[in-house]
Amino acid sequence: MKYRLFLIVSMVLLSCGGKHRTMDYNTDAALPDTLLLQPQEWKVITSGINKTTHTMSTLYGNELAVKAARSGQGNYPAGALLSLVTWKQQPDDHWFGAIIPGAVESVEQVSYTAGSISPVYTKYTGNRLAKRIESPEDSHNRVNWIIQQRASVMP
């Protein structure tokens, strides 16, 4: 009996010792601090996956944008900020078959200002998320696509 108790206690103590594994974070998907707006601090409006381009996106918004998106009317007030973050997909090393965000592919921001006829569109791409100049037609098309995204139903 004493031998069994000694064996059990020894096994428990040995399993507790050694190196403790720290939590792994997906640093590949992190946005750089140099980005003017930090959308990950906002609320999620919706998200999606593009199987053709192997990307995943999340549309974030500040409080005004989230309220407008959830109303379903499609009109964003002055002060509303939207940000669509798109990542390349990568397999999760810790969960077989899972796909997680990889490197950031782009960040597209739409901002509504008082007195402006149309929203301001800004796109950042590349490893360091450099500002990219888009044609007026491309900017208009992207803004229309972004603002037409329906808000996900959240509890």
Image (spheres, rainbow, N blue to C red):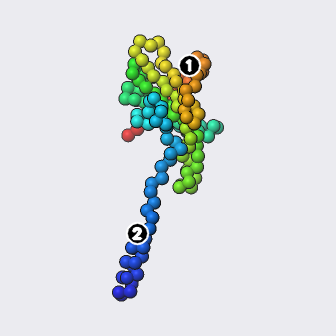
**Which of the 4 image quadrants contains residue 67?**
top left
Amino acid type, label 1: His
**Which of the 4 image quadrants contains residue 19?**
bottom left
Residue 150, how many percent across, how many down? Answer: 48, 30
Above-or-below relation of 25 to 62: below
Q: Which numbered tag is attached to residue 90?
A: none
Above-or-below relation of 109 to 7: above
Residue 12, how many percent across, how many down? Answer: 39, 73
Q: Secondary structure at mark 1?
A: helix
**Mark 1 lies on residue:** 140
Residue 61, how many percent across, how many down? Answer: 43, 30
Q: In this view of the protein, which residue sits in the foreground, 93 or 69?
A: 93
Q: Quadrant of the C terminus?
A: top left
Q: Secondary structure at mark 2?
A: helix
**Mark 2 lies on residue:** 16
Image marks 1 and 2: residues in contact by CB distance under 8 Å: no
Query: In the image, which is nearer the foreground, mark 1 or mark 2?
Result: 2
- The disc, 1 or 2, on the residue closer to the chain's N-terminal end is 2
Above-or-below relation of 15 to 107: below
Q: Residue at position x 41%, y 23% from top?
A: 80
Q: Residue at position x 38%, y 86% from top?
A: 3
**Callout 2: 10 Å neighbours few (<14), some, many (20+)?**
few
Amino acid type, label 2: Cys
